[in-house]
Image: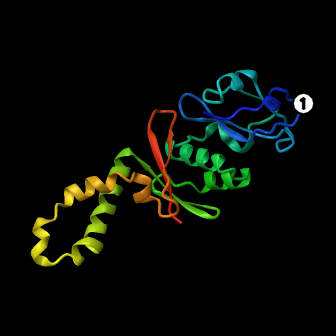
Amino acid sequence: MWPTSPAARDCSSPSTVNYFAIDEDGMIAAHIAHPERYPDGACVADEALAAHYETAMIAYEGPDPEGADTMKMHGKLQALVTYMNDNNAPQEEINEAVDDFDETSQTHDIPGQEVRILNEAEREEAIEETLDNYLDECILPELPESMRGYFDAEKWKRDARMEGAGHLLNSYDGTEHEHQDTNGVWWFLYRTN
């Protein structure tokens, strides 16, 4: 759900909103920004506020900024932009992240941090890989060879999963951020530094 601002209703007053508006097909409909940033007259229509920018109708008195109406926003990018907005990233940093975005990469560098973004299948695979690596590198080498047959790795993994995916995949603070994109796909974000 995209934030709204009462100031955005009036095209003559500066807006405090500076987000992307996404239409029902996952396309960026427009940047919603301070009118002074786009002097050609960016202005948000009332319909956009009512729809919380999920199916936004944007009115412009000038050309769309930066060709925003032609750019497909990947669900992973939607998750990254939402994460950055939730963490009060400046619009310039968000724009840079959009420009540098590579949908084939799981890891994305944004100013001051690295963020790993996974869908549900990738998340499960990463959890399994993390647990297997921990077993192979930390637990099994400490067990005497004669005792390894008594160790139940699957039960250990089940217990380790109880801590949550954030604990396993976020090496910074153990939290997991989640975002459902406009196509209903869930994305999970983990800060790794």
The x and y percentages for residue 48 are 69, 26
Residue 122 relative to residue 45: left or right: left
The image quadrant that residue 166 belongs to is bottom left
Q: Nearer the viewer, residue 122 or 28?
A: 122
User: Which residue occupies the extreme right position in the image?
Assistant: 12
Q: Which residue is mark 1?
A: 12
Residue at the spot x=54%, y=34% of the render? 26
Tell me residue 157's x, y (percent).
Answer: 26, 57
Residue 60 visible in this rendered orientation of the protein: no
Q: Disc 1 marks which amino acid?
A: Ser
Say if 73 sits above or below 172 in the image.
above
Q: Which percent across, then down, holds residue 61?
A: 82, 30
| Coloring basis for residues | rainbow
Please give the name of the residue rendered at 11% of the width and 66% of the height, measured from the top-left corner: 150
Q: Residue at x 52, y 55 (%)?
A: 102
* Dot 1: element: loop
Decide if residue 24 is on the left or right side of residue 58. Answer: left
